[in-house]
Amino acid sequence: MTQAQWKQFICRACGLIYDEQAGDPDSGIAPGTKFEDIPDDWVCPLCGVVKADFEPYDHAVPVATVSSSSKVFTRGLGAVIVGAGHAGWAVAEALRALDPTLPITMVTSCNGDRYLKPELSIAMSRGYTRETIVRESGSDSAQRLSVRLLADTFVVGLTPSLHQVRTTRGTLRYTNLVLAMGAQPALLPVLPAQLCWRINELSAWSGLHQKLSTGTKRVVIVGAGMVGCELADDFARAGHQVVLLDLQPQPLAALMPIQASERLRAGLEQTGVRFVGAVQVASVTVGQDGSKFVTTQCGRAFEADEVVAATGLVTDARISKGAGLAFERGIAVDSKTLQTSAPDVYALGDCVSIEGAPCRFIEPISKQASAIAHAILDIEYSGYAHTQPVIRLKTKSMPVVMHGLPVSGGVWETKEDTSDVLKMQQSLLGQMVVTLEIGKLAGRKRAQG
């Protein structure tokens, strides 16, 4: 087949593109596999939605653009979006799809380049570079969508009563404001920022990639949650010596029952990761030769070339609380409209909380963006319907798929236990609340007959 005959399909949830020519070898889909021939139970390797959530992707599809500035401002001040991550650009795309003339200004502390953040935890072993991770530059995306992009600009204050955002480039007025600021790595006091990497955005990943690109390195990762486990698996597969530390005796012990955690640990260790549990970091120091030493409260010490902190995420409350917005483990939003406690101010993505629970998954973002766009443009819409996204751990050594969240008092039951997969479910008062699969066949249907 010629290049022109191969087709591409884009995930509506996270933007990953399936290229028929390249296939998806990591998921068992060989290069040259037509999209129609992919099994129906295949899922997006980044966000976990199913095949039905992909649609044809055509580079040649025209996008509505604005021809003149006088036409741009016929609708008033327009929308201001704070944040140029996946959530911010998703709102810009949704708004522009519904209205080619609405003025849109995007404020971001970075350059606005577009990439899929979940790829950062699998990029080292795949040989990715910053250039291969970036899907579209911020300037190109802004031009394509007719967005005014204020890059390298920080928001310093917000006054909802005046419909104003104060930035390091001056004050912006808005008709509607969308907060897509994401969440920040939670850094414990014993982890000095200048000695510990936090891999939550591309520039940090690029800096660590440069350090690790000169040969085998010793890496200590503090925190064996989802991000810590994925990074440990990825770095070990890239040839580095990895030590993974955690307060819990097993990785992901706060999320999974002991049988699953032990299987995950075995998979990581088979890849080359050294897991050390039930330890608490007391300090991180640097020696005269530049080596770093991670010391635990029980007196154990681990020498490293690089230290990575993977101790969770928090939403920066400074701007939102200063503006008087309701805040509960994130910016509190209406579960249907995504509006905050202030009129004409919306929020989505990692920075929000819905009914008191943070929503830090990529899959719901496109639906949240669509709900916000319809609300801003006053177009009738059914609204956002929040459901618990599927949790997928992208550890190639031992993938995990979980539907639902464990509850206190729930009872775990093993449904299947083979060398290929462990299947468990948790029930409470006779009602199933969680299903869990871990192993090479996790998330895949079995052949019948």
Image (spheres, rainbow, N blue to C red):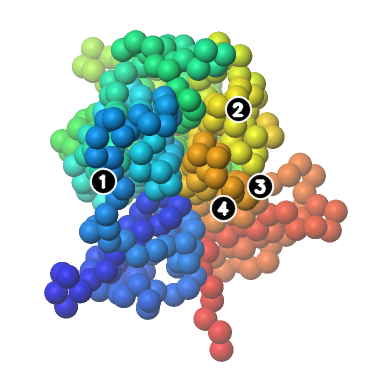
Instruction: Using the image as rendered, state which of residue 13 and residue 302 is in the foreground.
Output: 13
Name the secondary structure under disc 1: loop
x and y percentages locating residue 422 in the rendered image: 58, 62
Residue depicted at 41% across the width and 24% down the height: 77
Count the numbered circles shown.
4
Identify the amino acid type marked 4.
Answer: Val
Name the secondary structure under disc 4: loop
Report which residue position mark 3 lands on. 405
Mark 3 or mark 4: which comes first in sequence? 4
Nearer the camera: disc 1 or disc 4: 1
Identify the amino acid type marked 2.
Answer: Thr
Q: Residues within 10 Å of mark 2 (few under 14, many from 20)?
A: many
x and y percentages locating residue 414 in the rendered image: 69, 62
Q: Residues within 10 Å of mark 4 (few under 14, many from 20)?
A: some
Question: Mark number for residue 364?
Answer: none
Report which residue position mark 4 lands on. 390
Identify the amino acid type marked 3.
Answer: Leu
Report which residue position mark 1 lands on. 135
Nearer the camera: disc 2 or disc 4: 2
Nearer the camera: disc 1 or disc 3: 1
Q: Determine the image quadrant of residue 335.
A: top right
In the displayed structure, does residue 219 sit left or right of residue 42?
A: left
